[in-house]
């Protein structure tokens, strides 16, 4: 029995640990055993993961590049608009400054127009008064003529004074 026991139980030397031989696929099925399948699946998952990471990074890079292209286009457009607006702003400031400098002339023109309008009103009021005095004088003449009384002296209206500076300036 000891001979059989030695054949069935391998002898292990004390210097080296026992090594289990790797399992190889069974010749009948032609496929790897469980540990090799697990390794293949792990390897496939790692490949898929790195492939997905590369694809995600490429997608982010593409989006960033596309956004940068649009941003450069917008920056160029903004520069053009700012240049045009700066030019327009300078022109607007120049026009506003000349308008401010010409402000007293505008005020003076309004004053002259008001003066002319007031003079016209004074003339029309004076004419109305003159007409009223003349009508009164006619009535008094008619009433005195009907009574055959001595005629009363006719009161003359106040003379109209020309207050238009434009007429005085034209005469000079």
Image: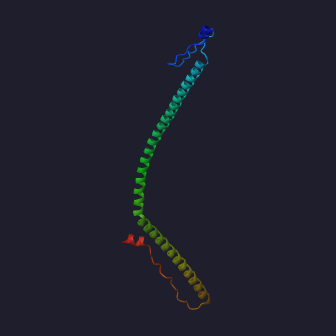
Quadrant of the frame with the N terminus: top right
- Looking at the image, residue 28 sits to the left or right of residue 59; the answer is right
Residue 41 on image: x %, y %: 59, 22
Question: Considering depth in this image, is 16 or 41 the residue closer to the camera?
Answer: 16
Question: Considering depth in this image, is 25 or 128 the residue closer to the camera?
Answer: 25
Residue 121 on image: x %, y %: 51, 74
- Looking at the image, residue 140 sits to the left or right of residue 85; the answer is right
Residue 26 in view, yes or no: no
Q: Is residue 107 above or below residue 90?
A: below
- Looking at the image, residue 143 sits to the left or right of residue 95; the answer is right
Residue found at x 53% / y 31%: 56
- Furthest residue toward left: 172
Residue 135 on image: x %, y %: 57, 81
Q: Is residue 58 above or below residue 94?
A: above
- Looking at the image, residue 142 sits to the left or right of residue 74; the answer is right
Q: Is residue 145 above or below residue 172?
A: below
């Amino acid at each position: 029995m000891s001979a059989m026991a030695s054949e069935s139980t391998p002898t292990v030397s004390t210097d080296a640990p026992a090594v289990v031989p790797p399992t190889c696929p069974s010749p009948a099925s032609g496929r790897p055993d469980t540990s090799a399948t697990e390794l293949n699946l792990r390897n496939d998952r790692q490949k898929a993961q790195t492939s997905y990471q590369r694809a995600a990074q490429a997608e982010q890079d593409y989006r960033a590049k596309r956004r940068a292209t649009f941003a450069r286009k917008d920056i160029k457009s903004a520069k053009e608009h700012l240049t045009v607006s700066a030019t327009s702003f300078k022109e607007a400031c120049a026009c506003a400054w000349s308008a401010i400098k010409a402000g007293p002339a505008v005020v003076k023109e309004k004053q002259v127009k008001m003066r002319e309008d007031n003079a016209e009103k004074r003339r029309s009021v004076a004419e109305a008064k003159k007409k009223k005095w003349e009508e009164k004088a006619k009535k008094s003449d008619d009433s005195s003529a009907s009574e055959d009384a001595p005629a009363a002296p006719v009161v003359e209206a106040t003379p109209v004074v020309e207050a238009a500076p434009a007429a005085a300036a034209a005469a000079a």
